[in-house]
Every structure is written in structure tokens, then in C-alpha cells.
Image (tube, grey):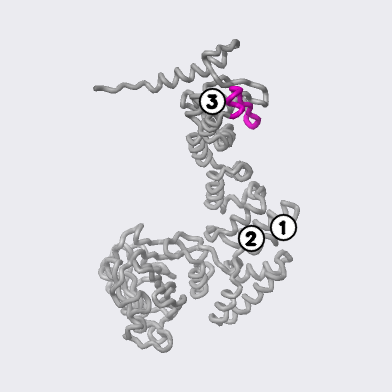
Amino acid sequence: METYSNLEKLSNDLKNLFQNQNKKEKEEESYFDFEIICEQNQTSFKTHKSILSSRSEYFKSLFDSKMKEYQENKLILKDVSSPILFSILNYFYSGKIEINLENAVEILIFSSKYLIDELIEICSNFVKKNFQFETIVDILKLSESRNLNQLIDPCYQFIFENLKEFIKTSFFLELEENHLNSILSNNKIPINEFELFQSIVKWGKHKSNINQIPNIIDKIRFIDFKKEELEETLKEDLIPNQISEKLIQFQKLQNGNDEKELDQFVEKENSLIFKPRIRFKSEILEEIEHLRKLKEWINDDEFFSKMKLGYSGKRDGFNCQNWHYTCDNHEKTLIIIKTKDNFIFGGFTEVGFTNSSFQSIENWGNVSPGWIWDLYAFIFSLRNDKNDRKPEKFPIKKEHSEYALYYDFYSKGPNFGGFDLTLESNLKTGFSNLGYNYQLPNGIEYHSDEAQHYLAGSYDKWEVDELETFFI
């Protein structure tokens, strides 16, 4: 048995049935049983209930319920233009429709109201593929007013992904206050916070109501400002007194170098202004408090504004030689490790993994293993759910700074202190015996079970889920 099909001819025949019937000046009762009238210009379209009900849940429900329109065989539509209605009815018969920048949104609005799922998907995908700075704000506003939920999130996503360029355009100034509140509530905005703040000020002036700014100012992450930027901002009369007083107090504590008091202040305030944004790709670093602690410990605005994810185990492979090829010879390197048991820890080095015998790429594999001096290196713990510990920093012992890092191209990945924290060549296993060259918390002795379990829950019975390395 063989099956033959000619869908193209079927499509054309049904299309002709609809189009030819609606070209006739004289009605032929046998050819149609339902009329749709476009109220805007009183254009009438002759159709078939069977076709309409099979193509739209709205029409199926209308006919099943035997409502007035069903009884009168007539429906008057007030919210659609004649060309759009013709295109949609023609699609019902032929399965074909032309979508362009001029009609896509209008067809989507009609399809959403009258439950035409296929066209909703087609038009949504078309509109999303053709987002532009010139139209994105209008589309967002229209989507909100017409409850086009399938477009609202993609609109915001487009704005987020292109925000660095978008804030420089006049179209940014056309956003409404609720849009800015949604944007600023996002913890992952990949642009400079001070630059973003200046754009908000410009937006307020454009709206001829600078007083609108205080309504959204509490979502600006002032903790991400450089010290001189924060000082400059506080001189301006744009920040409500309640917020400026908190920022002045934060400045004093920050300059006082009392980490415990600063933490207590930020925790008590629990405000977005003290919660930094994540401006780089990271699968591990998702909690804002973890990022805030890293920024506090490293204390280098330039590093956080320019750093990038240089190496990811899941993306680039778990191999120590690949890691060295990518991550060696970068100053200021941040390494974050997440285990299968959900422990998060790592280390930071000011000097990076650069062996003194390294001369050029040609002799990379011949570089001898050896110690690397770093007076400011430290190991850290961000998550230890087993013992319910808060993030902690473990600096290099000053008298041991010449043993801060150990370099071994062939057999070791990142190695802090030799024994304090080491990843093996497969970058999936390692060991930790905190306190050998790095400081331990008071009351814990080196080589004790607590010292060996402090970072990862055990000395060497842990497995890496992801390794991320950041540098400029």
C-alpha cells in the first residue's frame, strides 16, 4: 500500500474557496454558513463554521455554546482591521500567512484574544527575532497593555543583553518608571553601575520630573560604585536623605576596615543598595552575598569591573594542562570551586600562577615546578551547609608568603600553599588540609579533622562539580 498526498493543492483549493467566495458580489448560500464583519469599514467575510471551529478554540467554544452569534450566523469584530482579518481568515483556509514588521504585532494581538495558538507562536518568534532599539519600548508597552505575556520577558531580556548600548540611545529615555524598576531589580546587569546611575538621572531630566528618581534610587547598587564615584554622587542633591545617610555610614565603616562591623551593618540594612550585581558569567557565583564578600576581600574595583570567566571546567574541560595554558601568567586570579556536595570555596592570588622559569609559550611544558611568592593571597569558603558556616577568608601567613602558591604544569591544577588547597591533574579531585601555609580560624589546629574538613567536608573525599577561574 502506498500513501499519496498533495498538501499544496489542498491548501490552494481551500484558499480559493475562501477568496473566490468573498469576491462574489452575489451571495451563494450553499457555499458558506457564517459571516464575519469588520466594524471599522463594514467589510464582510463569508466563512464556514466547520473551518473556524477547527482552527480556533474561541470559535469552537462560540459555536458549541449556541450563543447569539451562532444563531444569527454572524459575528461583528470591533478590534481588528480589514487587512489583518483577511490575512487570518485566509490562513485558516490555506495554512499560509505573510508576517512582516508592519503586521506581526497586530496579528499577535488578534491571535492571543481569539486563541489561535499556531499564529501566537509564529508571530512571537518573528517579533523576537526582529527586536530593534527603535521599536523595543513600544513593543514592551503594547505587550503589557494587551497582556502579551509571551513577549514581555523577551523584551526585558533583549534590553538586559543590550543595555550597555541601549542606555546611550534616546529610546532608553522612553521607558516608564515601572520598566526601570524591573530592570534595576535584576541582579545581573553587565554594565558599570555608575554609568547606569547617570543614565537614570538623564532619564529623569528627560521626563521633566527629576523627582521621579527617588522612587527608583533604592534599586541602584551603590556598593558597586568606586569610592570617588560615591563621593561625587553624595554631593549631588539627587539621593533621598534616608539613603544618603546610610551611604555615609557605609563609607565610614568601609574606611575603618572593621569587617565584622561592616557585615553587621549590611546584614541589618538588608537593602539592594548594598547588594552588588553579578556582571560576569558564572554557574557557581549566584548568591549576591557571596559576591559582596569577594569584593570586600579583594578590594579592587578595577578587577571586578574588568574580570572575565577565563576558564570553566564544564566548558573547557577538566585537564590541568589546558587550565595552565589558559590561566597562567595572569595577575590577580580568582578561582572558585563547587563540589558535588555543594561546598563552594576557592582562592585568590595577586600575582597569578607565573613561575619564574617561564620565558615563552615554547618552553611552557618545560617550566620547572616550584613555589610562588604572594603576600596577599588568600583562600576562602563561601558555602559550607554541613556546618552552617558563613563566608570566611583565610589569608596567607605572612611568614609563609613565599609558599603561597605551588606551580606544577603537568601534575597539579591550582595549588594554594602546597597542602592547604590543591586540585589534582584531572581537576576533578583534590585535597585540603587548611592551616599549613594559610591561617586557620582561632581554636582550630592544623592537621585536625576540623582543619581537613573545613573547606570541602573532608580531606580528599570530595569531587569537583565545576571549576571557574576569573582574571582580567
The span from disc 2 to disc 3 (Cα, nearest Å) is 49 Å
Looking at the image, residue 290 sits to the left or right of residue 103; the answer is: left
**Residue furthest left as drawn:** 1
Q: Earlier in the sequence, mark 1 or mark 3?
A: 3
Tell me where the magenta segment starts and ends, as one range.
67-80
Q: Quadrant of the N terminus?
A: top left
Residue at image mark 2: 197
Give the crowd class for mark 1: few <14, some 14-19, many >=20 residues within 10 Å: some
Local secondary structure at mark 2: helix
The span from disc 2 to disc 1 (Cα, nearest Å) is 13 Å
Up the image or down, 404 lies above or below 117; here it is: below
| Residue 269 visible | yes
Q: Earlier in the sequence, mark 2 or mark 3?
A: 3
Q: Nearer the viewer, mark 2 or mark 3?
A: 3
Three-letter residue code for mark 3: Leu
Camera-side residue of 173 and 270: 270
Up the image or down, 187 lies above or below 144; here it is: below
Three-letter residue code for mark 2: Phe
Is 315 one of the magenta-colored residues?
Answer: no
Residue 69 appears at what percent x and percent y?
60, 26
Q: Quadrant of the C terminus?
A: bottom left
Give the crowd class for mark 2: few <14, some 14-19, many >=20 residues within 10 Å: some
Up the image or down, 117 lies above or below 31; here it is: below
Local secondary structure at mark 3: helix
Residue at image mark 1: 212
Give the crowd class for mark 3: few <14, some 14-19, many >=20 residues within 10 Å: many
Q: Nearer the viewer, mark 1 or mark 3?
A: 3
Q: Which mark is residue 89?
A: 3
> In the image, what residue occupies the spot 56% across and 74% down?
267
Three-letter residue code for mark 1: Gln
Looking at the image, residue 393 sits to the left or right of residue 171; the answer is: left
Q: Nearer the viewer, mark 2 or mark 1?
A: 1
